[in-house]
């Protein structure tokens, strides 16, 4: 059964990515808030904290929406694992994917940092019970991508990572739908 367990390297890398993804926007948001950016942040990202009513289909819609975030690093890992390392196309694909992942990740983390700067972590916490699960899914996908940059991943590794990310996003969608204040 040991062959079914994730490699310690991928677990360690995933934990590092998760910690960075959660702590970086928190630190930036707190620093920005302390620096007086709270009013600006609330103006740029006006959030409603009105309780909502869960509707049929919300879980599926959120799950599908969030699948996009993990699709890019997982597909990138698959592409890098499938391309010949000697071909120039591998370097080009890696550079392109690196840039896309950096921009996509930075945009997502910036939204959280601005939210924290404007509304504070305590107020945001009630509305973000799903965040650790979403970020864990993203961390697993990004860790797979980072590992694929070093050496090709086996299809079974990619499949396990994708299944883990999909399951984590399912939990996140349920929490985002039913774990926030409702009317």
Image: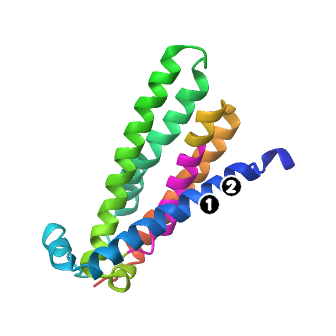
Q: Is residue 133 magenta?
A: yes
Instruction: Examine the rendered structure and indicate whether residue 69 appears above or below residue 121.
Output: above
Image point 15% across, 78% down: which residue?
Answer: 39
Q: Do callouts 2 and 1 mark residues in contact (Cβ within 8 Å)?
A: yes
Viewport quadrant of the C terminus = bottom left
Image point 38% across, 38% down: which residue?
Answer: 100
Q: Which residue lies furthest to the left in this view?
A: 43
For disc 1, the marked residue is 15
Nearest the eye: 170 or 54: 170
Nearest the eye: 54 or 100: 100
Image point 67% across, 33% down: which residue?
Answer: 153
Q: How many marks?
A: 2
Report whether 171 appears left or right of 164.
left
Label 2 secondary element: helix
Q: How crowded is mark 1: few (under 14 residues within 10 Å), some or many (20 or more)?
A: some
Residue 38 appears in which quarter of the rendering? bottom left
Instruction: Examine the rendered structure and indicate whether residue 86 appears above or below residue 12.
Output: above
Q: Which mark is residue 11?
A: 2
State how far apart marks 2 and 1 are (Cα). Answer: 6 Å
Q: Magenta stretch? A: 128-144
Q: Does the magenta stretch include residue 162?
A: no
Label 1 secondary element: helix
Q: Position of residue 76 (x, y in %)?
A: 50, 34
Image point 36% across, 69% down: which residue?
Answer: 28
Q: Which residue lies furthest to the front in this view?
A: 35
């Amino acid at each position: 059964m040991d062959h079914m367990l994730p490699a310690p390297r991928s677990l360690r890398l995933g934990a590092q990515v998760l910690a960075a993804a959660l702590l970086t926007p928190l630190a930036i948001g707190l620093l920005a808030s302390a620096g007086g950016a709270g009013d600006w942040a609330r103006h740029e990202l006006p959030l409603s904290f009105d309780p909502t009513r869960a509707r049929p289909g919300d879980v599926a819609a959120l799950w599908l929406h969030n699948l996009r975030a993990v699709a890019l690093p997982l597909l990138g890992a698959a592409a890098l694992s499938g391309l010949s390392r000697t071909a120039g196309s591998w370097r080009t694909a890696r550079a392109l994917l690196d840039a896309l992942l950096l921009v996509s990740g930075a945009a997502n983390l910036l939204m959280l940092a601005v939210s924290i700067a404007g509304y504070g972590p305590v107020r945001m916490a009630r509305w973000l019970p799903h965040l650790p699960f979403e970020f864990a899914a993203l961390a697993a996908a990004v860790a797979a991508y980072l590992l694929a940059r070093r050496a090709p991943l086996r299809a079974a590794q990619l499949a396990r990572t994708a299944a883990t990310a999909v399951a984590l996003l399912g939990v996140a969608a349920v929490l985002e739908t039913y774990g926030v204040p409702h009317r």
